[in-house]
Amino acid sequence: MITSLAYLGIKSPNKDEWPDLVTKVWGAQLAEPGPDGSVRVKFDDALWRLQIHPGEQDETAYIGWGVDHEEDLHALLKTLADLGVAAEVGSDELAAERAVNRIITFTDPWGFRHEVTWGQSHIACSFQPSRPISGFVTGQQGLGHVLLLLPDIDQAHEFFGKLGFRLSDKIIVPGRLYARFYHCNARHHTLALGQCPPGVAGLNHLMIQLQSIDDVGLAYELAEEHGVPLTMTLGRHSNDRQFSFYHSTPSSFHVEYGYGGLEVDEEAWVPRVYDRSAIWGHKPHPSGKGRPMGIMHQVP
Ligand code: FE
């Protein structure tokens, strides 16, 4: 079963605007560009975990997940077949491009392409932040979390449950927000699902987590300084207690830059329901006004 978010792939006409955000605000590292000129971003000793390919329009190209053992991919192929989802074993060329040893691919009922992988390439002691930061919380917890917008998240609960995602909690603000949060490792959530109108689906945000609260405060100032559109001010989430802010990226989706997310003890965890998303803060910021809610696509 899936145990982490390994990587994320985006297509965008604004690929060349990414290096500034990555190096001047995040403190992440630019890896060697991909064969198609993609921008590859490194957060730890994995070769890369975010890749922005050139494209005609913003597109969620693929969401890359990791499993712990090679055999888990066989089990997953069977699970997907039982769900009536056509999955393919990816070629060696594809595995090499993604810097993994084994890969299977499938498209979910909402039109997202998923890649489930084993054996992501790491080079020990290779991560060099582009500005002084304490580092990103990755390792067993993977890259971070993604929030997908789907028109029927209750239906999706069953689908993603079979892939290994366990409910952490829900946030329900009547008439405003309905979201479900799922873990597959110690990170409070690796996958979040937010309810959106019928007919469309999309990638709302990627969360990356820092090891120090000061990294977040400093990045907030740097984002303001470099004119990055902020979509939500500093605040603390009610459920995972993440201290974070949100900014828009050159490719329509958002990034949550955070610190201090809760870790789940699977044995003792009891899912709860919250009636607000933040304890304090996370207010809309004027600079992010009018930014799209994410990279949206039509549900097939
Ligand atoms: Fe988040």
Image (cartoon, rainbow, N blue to C red):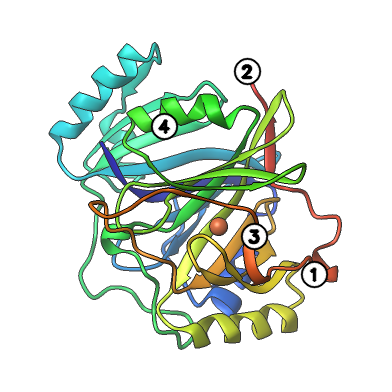
Query: Badge 3 is on which residue?
Result: 16
Q: Tell me the element at label 3.
A: helix
173 and 87: which one is in front?
Answer: 173
Q: Within 10 angstroms of label 1, few (less than 14), some, or many (20 or more) residues?
A: some
Identify the mark nearer the N-term, 3 or 2.
3
The residue wearing badge 2 is 300
Q: Residue at x 68, y 77 (%)?
A: 223
Residue type at the position of mark 1: His
Q: Give the CA distance from mark 3 to mark 2.
A: 30 Å
Q: State how far apart marks 4 and 2 are (Cα).
A: 18 Å
Amino acid residing under circle 2: Pro
Q: Earlier in the sequence, mark 4 or mark 2?
A: 4
Callout 3, which amino acid? Asp
Does the residue tagged 2 have its C-beta within 8 Å of any atom of ligand 1? no
Q: Horizontal placement of 153 versus 175: left or right?
A: left
Residue 41, horizontal then vertical, whole percent: 46, 62
Sequence order check, earlier mark of 4 and 3: 3
The answer for how far apart the CA atoms under marks 4 and 1 are is: 33 Å
Q: Mark 2 near mark 1, Cβ–Cβ under 8 Å?
A: no
- Expressed as whole percent of the image width and height from the top left, the position of residue 145 reads 47, 54
Front tag of 2 and 1 = 1
Q: Are the residues tagged 4 and 1 within 8 Å (C-beta)?
A: no
